[in-house]
């Protein structure tokens, strides 16, 4: 019974993390800012780390099935 919420949470975390990572990589590859008013390197680094954390959380949720 508890696998439903774990699947949903894992899917949401993985989709958000993957989308954020793809968006950050696309913006960085085009030499466009990831966040306005912030250093391009710092904003890409923070967004990339956040994406990896969300992907790890999604993977962790899937291991709890």
Image: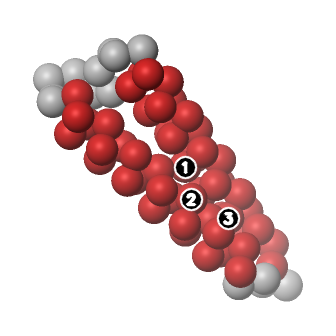
| Cα separation between marks 3 and 1 | 10 Å
| Cα separation between marks 3 and 2 | 9 Å
Please give the residue where the numbered disc 2 appears in the rendered image.
55
Q: Nearer the viewer, mark 3 or mark 2?
A: 2
Where is residue 16? Give x, y as percent: 57, 46
Where is residue 42? Give x, y as percent: 20, 39
Using the image, determine if residue 51 lies above or below residue 8.
above
Q: Which mark is residue 17?
A: 1
Front position in the image: 56 or 1: 56
Q: Are marks 2 and 1 in contact (CB under 8 Å)?
A: yes
Q: Element at badge 1?
A: helix
Which residue is situated farthest in the right direction here? 1
Q: Are marks 3 and 1 in contact (CB under 8 Å)?
A: no
Sequence order check: which comes first, mark 3 or mark 1?
3
Q: Nearer the viewer, mark 3 or mark 1?
A: 1
Q: Element at badge 3?
A: helix
Name the quarter where the N terminus is drawn. Answer: bottom right
Where is residue 54? Give x, y as percent: 51, 58
For residue 56, side relative to residue 1 (left or right): left
Where is residue 57? Give x, y as percent: 55, 68
Quarter residue 58 falls in? bottom right
Residue at 23% x, 34% y: name it.
41
Using the image, determine if residue 63 lies above or below residue 43.
below
Residue at 22% x, 22% y: name it.
36
Please give the residue where the numbered disc 3 appears in the rendered image.
10
For residue 58, side relative to residue 3 (left or right): left
């Amino acid at each position: 019974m508890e696998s439903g919420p774990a699947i949903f949470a894992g899917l949401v975390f993985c989709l958000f993390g993957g989308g954020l990572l793809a968006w950050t990589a696309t913006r960085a590859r085009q030499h466009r800012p990831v966040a306005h008013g912030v250093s391009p390197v710092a904003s890409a680094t923070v967004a990339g780390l956040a994406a990896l954390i969300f992907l790890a959380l999604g993977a962790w949720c899937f291991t709890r099935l």
